[in-house]
Image: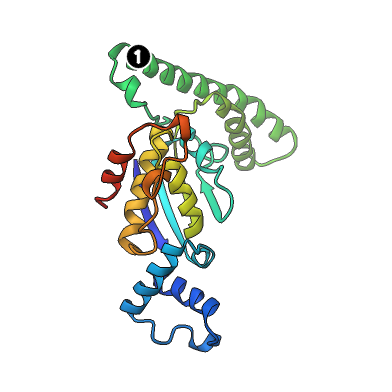
Amino acid sequence: MKVELIRYTPEPEKLVAAAAKLCYSKIGIDGILDGLDQEKTERFLNMLMDLGHESPIEHVSFTFGVEGVSRVLTHQLVRHRIGCSYSQQSQRYVKLEQFEYIIPPQIAAIEEARELFVRAMEKDQEVYNKLVEILYKENYKKCMEEGKTEKQASQMAEKASIEDARYVFPNACETKIVFTMSARALFNFFRTRCCERAQWEIREMATEMLKKVKEIAPVLFKHAGPGCLNGPCPEGNMSCGKSRDIREKFSKF
């Protein structure tokens, strides 16, 4: 898994402080950045975060590039919709000559399970390749009959073939995605996906994301993390029972 923070709103903490400052003072737009040095920004932001006033943090956003993850992960990721935008590598336009796949640690740890899993992946690739071959011949013939040039027929036939052949690919198929989240969306994302009850892969990604945004905006994200970080576990009877260990873990970054 590779997680990169590729872009973010410049001076995110200062911008949040300026937006919040407008809420609490008579000052006009031209003056909201005046006097906001690092010390005052941090003091104002600490007050804001401690009060739980989250609307001003919607003004800043963070863009991540992630690869080496499965479609299991991205199916969960795109459920986060408010304040989020996604661009994912398409299996409809990209022909996967040899698709990569993610092996869950539990399967990888058991030789028999791993061998069975790998055979299934290899079979999927074999069937995909055969389907593309069969469909390409029929689609190419149809395009030529419709009067397309050889180049046009080849391009159109390949696209039409791989968009149906891709149905055999598994959830384990590796994918790449670029996505942008507002800081407020990230708060919600970290609260649910850094939790021990989240699926292992997206939890690992969420934790890496949190580390990276804390490097850029440590005060803004000082309370960010799983639900049990700043109070009782919100999972009730379904709690993992490890709140103390979780708090110690997230206190280190």
Please name the colour scheme applied to the rendered image.
rainbow
Above or below, 98 relative to 195: above
The one of 96 and 197 positioned closer to us in this rendering: 197
Percent coordinates x, y for residue 208 in the rendering: 34, 47
Q: Is residue 96 visible?
A: no
Percent coordinates x, y for residue 129 in the rendering: 50, 24
Compared across the picture, whether 55 is left or right of 4 comes to: right
The one of 189 and 154 positioned closer to us in this rendering: 189
Compared across the picture, whether 70 is left or right of 29 comes to: left
Percent coordinates x, y for residue 5 in the rendering: 37, 56
Amino acid type of the residue that numbered disc 1 sits on in the rendered structure: Ala
Q: Which residue carries the number 1 mark?
A: 113
Residue lying farthest top?
112
Q: Secondary structure at mark 1?
A: helix
Residue at 55% x, 87% y is 28
Residue at 69% x, 35% y is 143
